Image (cartoon, helix red, strand yellow):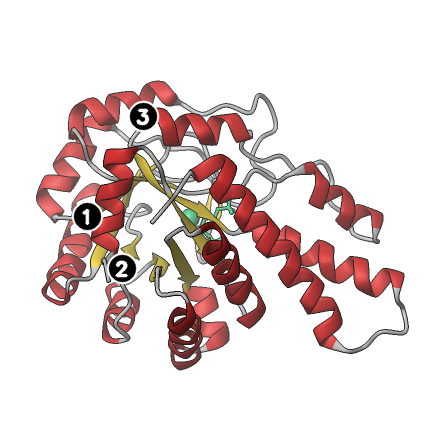
Amino acid sequence: MNNLKYYIDKALNEGFALGAFNFNNMESLQAIAEGCKECRSPAIISVSEGALEYMGGKVVKALANAVREDYPFLFLHLDHGKSVEVCKKAIELDFDSVMIDGSALGLEENITITKEVCEMAHPKNILVEGELGQIKGIEDNVEVEKQHYTNPKLAKVFIEKTGVDLLAVAIGTSHGAYKYSGEQTLRFDILSEIEREVGSFPLVLHGASTVDKYYVDQINKFGGKLNNPLGVPRELIVKAVKEHNIVKINTDTDLRLAMTAGVREVLTQNPEVFDLRKYLGKGRENIKELVKDKIENLFFSKL
Ligand code: G3H
Ligand code: 13P
Ligand code: ZN
């Protein structure tokens, strides 16, 4: 069985990206697993600190192991670990990779904690993702007001000093459903500059949900209130994957929208329903279709 490092290297060499799909409950994880299995694709299954707290470490691990018994090419990842302690917890739970997100700190402090996590993780062959530059929007514990793009020269220093395996870059994406007020663009010039500095190194794109109109419209049709949310245009995701060294694409919001659309649809159309399997089941179907679409048309990931 090939490990995560194998698929990261393969993605870098062959020009595809692994989806890093956040999950928050059994249904969302099952949908991701089934979508990946049908597409014969590896993927990363991510839990944020919030998700880890919501489900509990033991349940997260048990759910991940259960779906991997049926389809093993899913790698468990801690998303946006904000402290060495939470990364340590994920390392103790034998995650495949952890993200230490020191992006809100000064460079030296970010380097110090990222290096510390690498030293804990690497002896267990657990990969570490660091972040340099800040991704706008609301992350779990931190709200980032202004966009701070990744400084290409510092990216090289950061990688050399920390020993990270993957680097999350800030090139104009943001977390959540409201990513843009003006033009929906990404700073590919900064990405190219980073690539010139760091060479062939695996890069990560956070905040990469496309916020497809279909699910937004479904949510609003069935009683929701989303006021013109905007995601990253699909063609920009394809460009990042095909023409750049983005090998991991983080997606959470799109799964939330798909689940919510399904739940709202069933409950609105069938007000008598109170069997949670009926509405969560529809949400699960939606997420599975979404995952398949991303793999086939945006990420091109394969075993
Ligand atoms: O990057 C942020 C993810 O969307 C996680 O969100 O902390 O609300 O689980 P969460
Ligand atoms: P989205 O909010 O665009 O789905 O981004 C998720 C993410 O970056 C998780 O780390
Ligand atoms: Zn993120």
Q: Residue at x 30, y 68 (%)?
A: 86
CA separation, marks 2 and 1?
9 Å
CA separation, marks 2 and 3?
23 Å
Disc 2 target residue? 97
Residue 58, image x and y in percent? 39, 81
Disc 3 target residue? 191
* Relative to 125, 294 lies left or right: right
Disc 1 target residue? 165
Badge 1 vs badge 3, beta-carbon distance below 8 Å? no
Above or below, 300 relative to 42: above
Above or below, 109 relative to 247: below
Residue 79, image x and y in percent? 37, 57
Give the quadrant of residue 146. top left
For the residue pair 226 and 5, the one nearer the viewer reads as 5
Closer to the chain start, of discs 2 and 3, is: 2
Badge 2 vs badge 1, beta-carbon distance below 8 Å? yes
